[in-house]
Amino acid sequence: MATSGEESDRWLHDGLCDAFKIEKLRPFQFQHALDLYKGKDVFLTIATGEGKTTVLLSPLIAAKLKLEEGIGIAVVPTKALAQQLEKTARAVGLDALSVTEDTLREADALGNDLFKVLAPNNSPKEENPA
């Protein structure tokens, strides 16, 4: 029998399953998704393909389900992983952008400062008036 806490958190489980088009989350995924949603820190080390991305994106999906705004920043070691994370985020209905050396160079060639677009008050190219 489910406890009232489990019942009240069911929205998150079901919402994540719907977003990722899976039948059910692995127990660690749900627990850590709850942890992140509640503002706790999570340090997760598991093998490739075991479900880290589901956990990583869970607070953003939760915010979307609750009609709240949210911003997530993931720092990853490779361009390929950044692009994969962007693709997965978009597939589950999130707005996403991977910022790599290539995207910065391409934007700069077009005269765009991605830092101004992403953080308009904090662009490193912006000069500070004295």
Image (cartoon, rainbow, N blue to C red):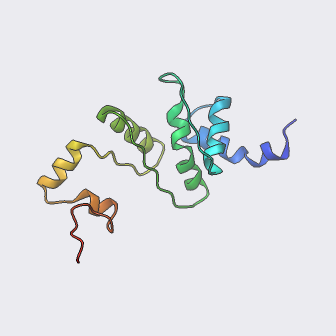
Q: Quadrant of the C terminus?
A: bottom left
Q: Residue 60: x percent and y percent?
A: 53, 50
Q: Residue 68: x percent and y percent?
A: 56, 61
The answer to whether residue 24 of the structure is visible from this angle is no
User: Which residue corresponds to the image point at 31% horizontal and 32% vertical from the top-left?
Assistant: 80
In the image, taking residue 29 as reference, residue 102 lies left or right, namely left
Q: Residue 81: x percent and y percent?
A: 36, 33
User: Which residue corresponds to the image point at 47% horizontal and 55% vertical from the top-left?
Assistant: 71
Q: With respect to residue 124, does 16 lie above or below?
A: above
In the image, taking residue 59 as reference, residue 71 lies left or right, namely left
Residue located farthest toward the right when viewing the structure as drawn: 1
Based on the displayed image, in which of its 4 quarters is residue 27 positioned? top right
Nearer to the camera, 125 or 64:
125
Residue located farthest toward the left when viewing the structure as drawn: 109
Nearer to the camera, 36 or 107:
36
In the image, taking residue 125 as reference, residue 120 lies left or right, namely right
Q: Residue 106: x percent and y percent?
A: 16, 48
Residue located farthest toward the front when viewing the structure as drawn: 130
Residue located farthest toward the bottom when viewing the structure as drawn: 130
